[in-house]
Amino acid sequence: MLGLRRLFGTNGIRGVVNKELTPEMAIKIGNTMGTFFQHGNLIVGYDARTSSPMLARAVIAGLNATGCNVLFAGMAPTPALQYAVKNHETNGAVIITASHNPPEYNGIKVVWSDGIEFSREQEIEIENIFFDEKVRYAEWNNIGATHDLPGVIDDYIEAIKKHVDNAEIAKKHYHVVVDAANSVGSLAAPRLLRELGCKVTTINANIDGTFPRRTPEPRPENLEDLALTVKAVDADLGVAYDGDADRSIFVDEQGEIHWGDKTFALLEKHFLKDNPSEKIVTPVSSSTLVKDIADTYGGEIVWTKVGSITVSQTMKKLNAKLGGEENGGIFYGLHQSVRDGAMATALILDIMAKTGEKLSKLLGELPKYFIEKGKIECPNELKEKVLEKLTEQLSRLNISTIDGVKIWFEDKSAILIRPSGTEPIYRLYAEAKTEEKALKLVREYSLKLKKIIDSLKS
């Protein structure tokens, strides 16, 4: 769907429903997954999108046709389904979700037996089966069966509670506002919080796959209702989830919305206090703040390409216990090495309870950076040449080329310039100790980038 012999994007297979992602396509993908797993036992579940039940049934038919047995978990947060894979010792899972994409999209994620999404090498195997039409159907008497799998969310909530001090959190009687994006975030997090002794106020908590109140992408500009509600009900914090509830963005008691770097850095700080010398895995798009915390508390930063699968796979390879992304993804390896919004929420409450401090104070104690973002249009066919020329121009500076080009300056400012994996644009992420410097970096490097793109067009 993303081009010749490519099914997978940066996070699963995605497309517009009944245009790029049809029931026929979903059956064929199910056949392909079933061929790859060779008569295995697989969990299937889905998010709240209007098309998810339809696509789940199609995928299940495709899996059964190749001899795979399906444990059908129904609607659930993605991290709950990933936990179920390990908990029930299945061969893997197929999850129907398009995460933060608009409602007309849906997608298919494939999870390995450890609960982690497929590596790029495994994705290539799947793509080869799909495009070379190497599907192997079962004989009529070996078609797979489908059985319901109840209790997935119950097990998931109990697993999270094992990693935090339940009694200490309960003593504080925290009031938490949950913005569930009208999706599966409403199925686990409110229950978890109530079981931790919190008072819970919910907004956008009814399941509605059209996402009527806000897009399922929890960006600060979409979370004004959450911030206003936190202030109005005098809550201790607010949390917003994305469409499949694996990411979380937090609002402090003063109604200030905090991007994911800050809450990740707070978790990192307290994790390293208890676990010095540990590796912290994060993409190059993360703030220098994350490195500052690692330097102060004796951790080691491992930078990766942008993408949650890369973070998970790197954690797995290094046996790292903590990872994070600037978009609100927290990977707590002691629970599972995948993004998990409800786990992140419990960990934030655990820190608040143990320190006795408000979230605004805890985040206010971290080093401060101003972040500015920009984008420049660039035809997909020029992206590689643009990157080569840009890297050549910047070669004398302190740069990293793990993913695009990131430049670190002596005054602790930095800028990441990278081609989008999904759109014909280059993205710029700048940070500095002043807002003016961050804006200046975006302007300066947008001009440099535009000159290179224009020169290659002519």
Image (spheres, rainbow, N blue to C red):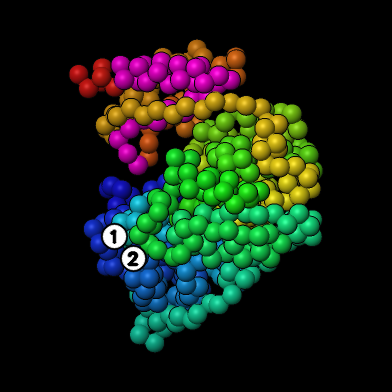
**Residues at badges 2 and 1 in contact (C-beta under 8 Å)?**
yes
Q: Is residue 69 above or below residue 84?
A: below
- Magenta range is 422-451
Tag 1, which secondary structure? loop
Q: Is residue 5 above or below residue 52?
A: above
Residue 243 position in % (x across, y down) = 45, 55
**Quadrant of the snapshot with the C terminus:** top left
Q: Is residue 222 above or below residue 290?
A: below
Tag 2, which secondary structure? loop
Tell me, for residue 51, which label it has, or none.
2
- In the picture, residue 193 is in which quadrant? bottom right
Residue at (55, 19) in percent of width and height: 434
Q: Say whether disc 2 or disc 1 marks the residue closer to the N-terminus.
A: 1
Report the side of 345 relative to 184 (left or right).
right
Residue at the extreme top: 396
Q: Is residue 423 a member of the stretch shown in magenta? A: yes
Residue at (56, 55) in percent of width and height: 178
Report the side of 233 relative to 23 (left or right).
right
| Circle 1 residues within 10 Å: few <14, some 14–19, many ≥20 | some
Tell me, for residue 254, which label it has, or none.
none
Q: Which amino acid does the dot numbered 1 rest on?
A: Val
Report the side of 219 relative to 61 (left or right).
right
Identify the residue position indicated by label 1 in the image.
17
Q: Which amino acid does the dot numbered 2 rest on?
A: Ser
Q: Is residue 31 visible?
A: no
Residue 192 position in % (x across, y down) = 64, 63
What is the tally of numbered marks visible in this picture?
Answer: 2
